[in-house]
C-alpha cells in the first residue's frame, strides 16, 4: 500500500508549516469529506474527467486519510487489511461474484 517514506514526507511537510495544531481528528475527517466532494466534482457534468485533476484531488483525499490514521494511531495498511477480512466474510465469492447486491440481500 503506502510506502513509509510517503508518510514521512507528509509529516515533514506539515511540521515545517506547524499545521499539526489544526489537525484534530474531527478537522481531518471534515477535510476528507470536503476533498472527496472536490474529487466527485471532477465527474459532475462529464464522466470523462480531467485525469490530472482527478489525481490531484485523489492525492488530497489520501493525504488527509493518512493524516487521520496517524492522528488516531492507526496503521493505514493494517486497517485496510482488517476491513478486507471483514468484507470477505460479508461478501463470499460464491454469492457476490459479479454482483453489486448489498451483503444483507445476497
Image (cartoon, rainbow, N blue to C red):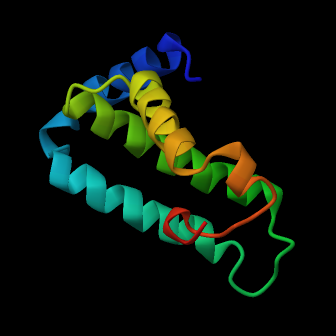
State the image coordinates of residue 97 (x, y, percent, origin top left): 77, 53
Q: Tell me where residue 38 sits by quadrant.
A: bottom right
Along the line of sight, which residue is nearer the eye, 11 or 89? 89
Above or below — where is 8 with respect to 10? above
Question: Can residue 18 be seen in this snapshot?
Answer: no
Q: Quadrant of the C terminus?
A: bottom right
State the image coordinates of residue 87 (x, y, percent, origin top left): 51, 45
Along the line of sight, which residue is nearer the eye, 57 or 25? 25
Q: Tell me where residue 18 sits by quadrant.
A: top left
Q: Is residue 35 left or right of residue 45?
A: left
Q: Is residue 102 left or right of residue 8?
A: right
Above or below — where is 63 with respect to 56? above
Residue at 68%, 83% (x, y): give it.
44
Q: Is residue 82 left or right of residue 22?
A: right
State the image coordinates of residue 94 (x, y, percent, origin top left): 73, 48
Question: Can residue 71 be seen in this snapshot?
Answer: yes
State the image coordinates of residue 45 (x, y, percent, origin top left): 75, 87
Above or below — where is 44 with respect to 88? below
Residue at 51%, 50% (x, y): give it.
90
Above or below — where is 103 with respect to 75? below
Residue at 21%, 33% (x, y): give it.
71
Q: Is residue 49 left or right of residue 88?
A: right
Amino acid at each position: 500500500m503506502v510506502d513509509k517514506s510517503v508518510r514521512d514526507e507528509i509529516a515533514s511537510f506539515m511540521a515545517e508549516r506547524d499545521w499539526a495544531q489544526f489537525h484534530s481528528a474531527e478537522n481531518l475527517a471534515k477535510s476528507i469529506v470536503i476533498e472527496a466532494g472536490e474529487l466527485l466534482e471532477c465527474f459532475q457534468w462529464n464522466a470523462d474527467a480531467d485525469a490530472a485533476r482527478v489525481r490531484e484531488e485523489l492525492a488530497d483525499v489520501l493525504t488527509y486519510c493518512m493524516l487521520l490514521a496517524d492522528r488516531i494511531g492507526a496503521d493505514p495498511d493494517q486497517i485496510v487489511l482488517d476491513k478486507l477480512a471483514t468484507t470477505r466474510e460479508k461478501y463470499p465469492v460464491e454469492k457476490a461474484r459479479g454482483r453489486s447486491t448489498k451483503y444483507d440481500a445476497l
